Image (cartoon, rainbow, N blue to C red):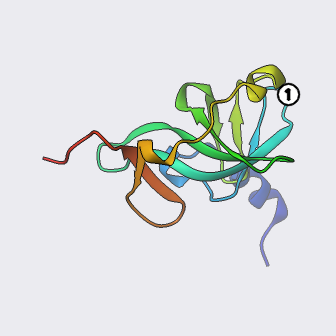
Amino acid sequence: MSDPTIDAAADQEQVAWIRTPYHAPILDLDGNSFGTTESLLGDEGEDIFHGLAVKLTGGGHLVEVAAANVVKITLAAVHTDLGPEAVAQLPAYQAERWYHLGEGGLFRKHAEWKDG
């Protein structure tokens, strides 16, 4: 049986972007959930994090949250610096800008980049 105190502490420990949990709540500046993580936007091989594709609560449509707005990623949630007004202005997720790289959430990178 696990210790709930240890589990809670582990859930709040900051992790690398590549360990972002699939369907984790994404929180605004005040700690209110405004959606869930659907995809990682980045280049796993180069360890470059561009942001997240987020499914909004209520409307269900996908938006992009830039890496610059991500303050902390834990195993329990993604914390951002976005206020309610900024959340309402997030750009729509555009799948054509990204392509599939892996499993466990979708890893994506700019389509115009070439491996080489």
Pick whichever, 51 or 5, lies toward us: 51
The percent coordinates of residue 51 (x first, y second) are: 53, 37
Q: In which quarter of the image is residue 7?
A: bottom right
User: Which residue appears at 45% of the width and 38% of the height?
Assistant: 49
**Disc 1 crowd, CA 10 A, few/some/many (<14, 14-19, 20+):** few
Q: In this view, does 28 lie above or below 59?
A: above
Of the pair 76 and 98, the residue shown nearer to us: 98
> Residue 4 location, x and y as percent?
83, 63
Q: Quadrant of the N terminus?
A: bottom right
Q: Which of 50 and 75 is in front in this view?
A: 50
Q: How many labels does the image show?
A: 1
Q: Mark 1 points at which residue?
A: 30
Residue 69 is situated, as x and y percent measured from the top left of the image, at 62, 26
The amino acid sitting under disc 1 is Asp
Q: Where is residue 13 in the image (x, y as percent from the top left)?
A: 65, 46
Residue furthest to the bottom in view is: 1
As helix, strand or loop, the secondary structure at mark 1 comes to loop
